[in-house]
Image (tube, helix red, strand yellow):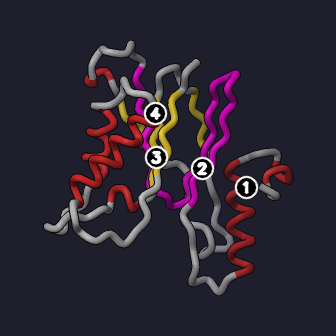
Amino acid sequence: RSQAPLRGFSPAALISDINRLMCNSTDGSKYATFFCSIYNDKSRQFTFVNAGHNPPMLFRTNRVPGEGVDSCKIVRLTTGGTVVGIFPGAEYEQETLTLCPGDLMVVFTDGVTEAFNAENEEFGEERLADVVRKSLDLPCPRIQDRIISEIDAFVADAPQHDDITLLVIRVTA
């Protein structure tokens, strides 16, 4: 947060600064994935940069609740660059999208998609997208609860070794 005002809130410039600071303060064996964005609720402009993080899923619905799941397109938010903390000169791109009322975004850590069951199968991105598609008419907290419930049912008693963190956001106006 202390770096953002220095660059006029450009996510790409901010991530470049964070990368440089991290490279200067570590031995190069530590890194982090990062997803950074800015949303203007008046223009519905969403500007983001993805630094090696699992690409969030943007469900472009353009639909009326109850229409069904076939009218939904999933956009993966991949624009950005490499992880932060390893390559001091890394450059990052940003992308700006105009979001529409009803669009839904799921930002998640790899612990969501890499949750393993007893047969050593991953929950995976396809299952995650399927759960969200079937839940589009629900409020965001209920979608998040449903995702967690589906992961819990999938892994059952299999031990997990990573965090499960996710954020579900919907554009309302």
Quarter of the rendering containing residue 144 = top left
Mark closer to the chain start, 2 or 4: 2
Q: Which residue is at the far left?
A: 119
- Tag 2: Cα neighbours inside 10 Å, few (<14), some, or many (≥20)? many
Tell me the mark number nearer the camera, choosing from 4 and 3.
4
Residue type, mark 4 in image: Cys
Badge 1 element: helix
The answer to whether mark 1 and mark 2 are in CB contact below 8 A is yes
Badge 4 element: helix
Residue 37 in percent (x, y) is at: 63, 44
Number of labels in the image equals 4
* 91 or 37, nearer to the observer: 37
Residue type, mark 3 in image: Pro
Q: Is residue 60 magenta?
A: yes
Mark closer to the chain start, 4 or 3: 3
The residue stretch that appears in magenta: 34-61
- Above-or-below relation of 142 to 93: above
- Tag 4: Cα neighbours inside 10 Å, few (<14), some, or many (≥20)? some
The residue labelled by disc 3 is 56
Q: What is the quadrant of the C terminus in the image?
A: top right
Mark closer to the chain start, 2 or 3: 2
Magenta stretch: dominant secondary structure? strand
- Above-or-below relation of 18 to 136: below
Residue 14: mark: 1
Mark closer to the chain start, 1 or 2: 1
Residue 51: mark: none
